[in-house]
């Protein structure tokens, strides 16, 4: 019978293995073939040494698991093969000790087999022992299965614990920590406690800016700059951004799509007056509002005018300061100053009354960055509600140095301690001590009566070239340096402090319901007082239709808190024109136009 292919291969392999020279030649050919295939890129397996560190650890962990399984199988197999079955008692021996049988007559045809020729009990284990071995194997198999499940559960548990730790760290960052209710806390502070307390104190709600940004979510763009460019002729033109351009001053944000009456919700910051134990205070809360798309779009258009002015001022002041620093001459100096938040003096070990009471002193920090590169002086102010640049970083660095010292056991109890500690540190920041006496000396030189400068909250540049005289404008310009007083850009105004006059007193605001004219972002608005809270008043403002003497109550109401200094004049109640519109009297209309 001819051999099969498998038998031929087996015999050939046996002949090769029997000859050492032939086997060495065979292995060399195999190795050369493997290297050639590897160079051709047909082998995708990568050696462990060439894998990344993380992959190497994973692969070696798999090898360990496979090796443990292999050793476990070998151990179980060895136990089964080396199992010695118990010996069984011979049935023949039992018969020897059995009861005597009575003698029976044996006939000729009966044949009694000799005892030696009878079959004896077999030494092979009975079926019961085979069942016991199978049961043992089943138990081992089940135990192996449970062991792998336990390993899997431990890995999942480790992964879940890591996730839980990450979530806990996030929760610890977000939650507000409360002080312990003990009479004396004399333990050392945690390393991160001071930084966390400082974060809790720094809470500032930029309402108008934030509300405008949240309301822009109803449009196809998330960029405020793109939104403003869509409603003005030129975003770099002051008149357009101040909403004084004849072409684009009446442009409003348009909604892409039909304005249906479906109810939608949005969030908005609002000021809420809270009364606790006969004390009234105002707090800001994020309120969820609901209404139609048209209502939301109308609310956005009400807030877009002051926001365009704010956006232009911020971008222009930032760009002007950057250009000024890059074009300084050798005899010029640019000083960038910011008022940093007061630093609270701290102790490494303190009792509870000191920590929660009013015993802590504060050090006032004014940070300054000088750019060198002066008969006339100009002051330029950044736009409100935005960072001031490099001085912010200086203030943060100074406070961080002081906080680190407190964490290491240093006590900084007074502003003098803070100053003495900082001047001893190796830093490129120079520190100067200004006492209250130094400040009072300058206060004494200021006259008691000084002419009021109109619109101090909206001016961003002040120029002084001669004593007792200043020039100011809404935004900065440096096109005529060093003769800054010769620049006529952006309509500068001049004030002579030698012409002393009494500052106008604010109107009496003792009664609710009065109609007044208030100043908001440099524009007058007609409104009615709804309530008075301390030195602030809540006013419900009316909407003017174009430049005419026609006013109407907007929906929803335009409620906002103002300071008493923002009140321009008190007027009489507007006269009704029809069921929806009203107008001012001739005298009040002249007052309103004079404030425009």
Image: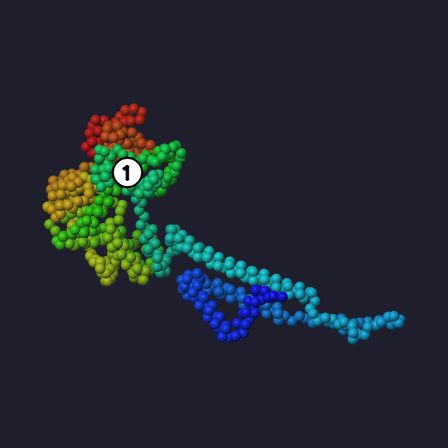
Residue at x 37% of width, y 53% of height: 173
Decide which of 285, 445 is in the foreground and name it: 285
Q: Tell me if mark 1 has few (under 14), some (14-19) or many (20+) residues whose alpha carbon lies within 10 angstroms of its own.
A: some
Residue at the spot of label 1: 230
Which image quarter: residue 131?
bottom right
Decide which of 43, 143 is in the foreground and name it: 43
Residue 273 shows up from this direction = no
Decide which of 35, 446 is in the foreground and name it: 35
Q: How many marks?
A: 1
Residue at x 46% of width, y 70% of height: 28
**Direction front: furthest residue:** 2
Q: Is residue 236 above or below residue 155?
A: above
Q: Is residue 33 left or right of residue 542?
A: right
Q: Is residue 27 left or right of residue 220?
A: right
Dot 1: element: loop
Residue 30 location in percent, x, y?
47, 68
Q: Is residue 542 left or right of residue 497?
A: right
Q: Image quadrant for the C terminus?
A: top left
Q: Is residue 557 left or right of residue 426?
A: right
Which image quarter: residue 92?
bottom right
Decide which of 82, 176 is in the foreground and name it: 82
Residue 477 location in percent, x, y?
17, 44
Residue at x 50% of width, y 59% of height: 154
Which image quarter: residue 473?
top left
Residue 557 location in percent, x, y?
32, 33
Residue at x 30% of width, y 44% of height: 206
Residue 490 location in percent, x, y?
17, 40
Residue 26 shows up from this direction = yes
């Amino acid at each position: 019978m001819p051999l099969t292919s498998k038998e031929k291969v087996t015999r050939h392999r046996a002949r090769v293995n029997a000859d050492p020279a032939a086997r060495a030649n065979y292995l060399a050919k195999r190795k050369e073939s493997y290297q050639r295939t590897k160079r051709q890129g047909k082998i995708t397996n990568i050696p462990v040494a060439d894998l990344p560190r993380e992959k190497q650890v994973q692969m070696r962990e798999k090898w360990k698991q496979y090796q443990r399984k292999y050793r476990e199988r070998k151990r179980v197999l060895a136990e089964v093969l080396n199992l010695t079955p118990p010996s069984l008692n011979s049935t023949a021996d039992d018969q020897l000790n059995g009861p005597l049988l009575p003698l029976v007559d044996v006939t000729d045809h009966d044949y009694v087999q000799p005892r030696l020729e009878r079959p004896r009990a077999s030494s092979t284990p009975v079926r019961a022992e085979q069942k016991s071995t199978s049961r043992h194997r089943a138990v081992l198999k089940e135990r192996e299965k449970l062991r792998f499940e336990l390993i899997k559960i431990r890995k999942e548990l480790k992964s879940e614990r890591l996730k839980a730790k990450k979530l806990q760290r996030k929760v610890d960052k977000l939650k507000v920590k409360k002080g312990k209710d003990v009479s004396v806390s004399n333990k050392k502070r945690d390393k991160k406690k001071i930084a966390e307390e400082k974060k809790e104190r720094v809470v500032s709600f930029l309402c108008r800016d934030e509300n405008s940004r949240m309301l822009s979510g109803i449009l196809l763009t998330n960029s405020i700059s793109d939104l403003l460019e869509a409603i003005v002729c030129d975003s770099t033109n002051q008149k357009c951004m101040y909403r004084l351009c004849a072409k684009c001053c009446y442009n409003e944000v348009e909604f892409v799509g039909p304005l249906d009456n479906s109810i939608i919700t949005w969030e908005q910051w609002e000021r809420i007056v809270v009364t606790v134990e006969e004390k009234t205070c105002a707090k800001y809360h994020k309120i969820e509002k609901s209404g139609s798309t048209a209502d939301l779009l109308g609310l956005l258009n009400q807030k877009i005018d002051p926001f365009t002015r704010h956006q232009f001022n911020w971008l222009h002041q930032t760009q002007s300061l950057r250009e000024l620093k890059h074009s300084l001459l050798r005899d010029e100096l640019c000083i960038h100053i910011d008022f940093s938040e007061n630093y609270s003096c701290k102790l490494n070990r303190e009792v509870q009354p000191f920590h929660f009471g009013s015993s802590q002193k504060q050090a006032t920090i004014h940070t300054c960055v000088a750019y060198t590169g002066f008969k006339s002086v100009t002051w330029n102010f950044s736009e409100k509600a935005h960072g001031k640049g490099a001085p912010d970083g200086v203030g943060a660095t100074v406070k961080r140095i002081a906080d680190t010292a407190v964490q290491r056991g240093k006590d900084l109890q007074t502003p003098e301690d803070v100053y003495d500690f900082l001047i001893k540190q190796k830093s490129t920041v120079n520190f100067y001590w200004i006492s209250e006496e130094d400040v009072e000396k300058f206060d004494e030189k200021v006259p008691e009566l000084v002419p009021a400068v109109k619109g101090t909250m909206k001016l961003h540049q002040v120029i002084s070239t001669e004593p007792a005289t200043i020039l100011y404008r809404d935004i900065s310009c440096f096109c005529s340096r060093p003769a800054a007083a010769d620049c006529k850009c952006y309509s500068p105004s001049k004030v002579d402090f030698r012409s002393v006059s009494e500052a106008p007193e604010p109107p009496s605001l003792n009664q609710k319901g009065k109609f007044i004219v208030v100043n908001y972002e440099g524009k007058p608005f007609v409104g009615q007082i709804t309530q008075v809270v301390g030195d602030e008043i809540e006013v419900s403002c009316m909407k003017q239709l174009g430049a005419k003497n026609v006013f109407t109550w907007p929906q929803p109401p335009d409620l906002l808190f103002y300071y008493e200094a923002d009140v321009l004049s008190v007027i009489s109640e507007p006269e009704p024109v029809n069921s929806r519109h009203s107008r001012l009297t001739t005298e009040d209309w002249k007052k309103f136009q004079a404030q425009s």
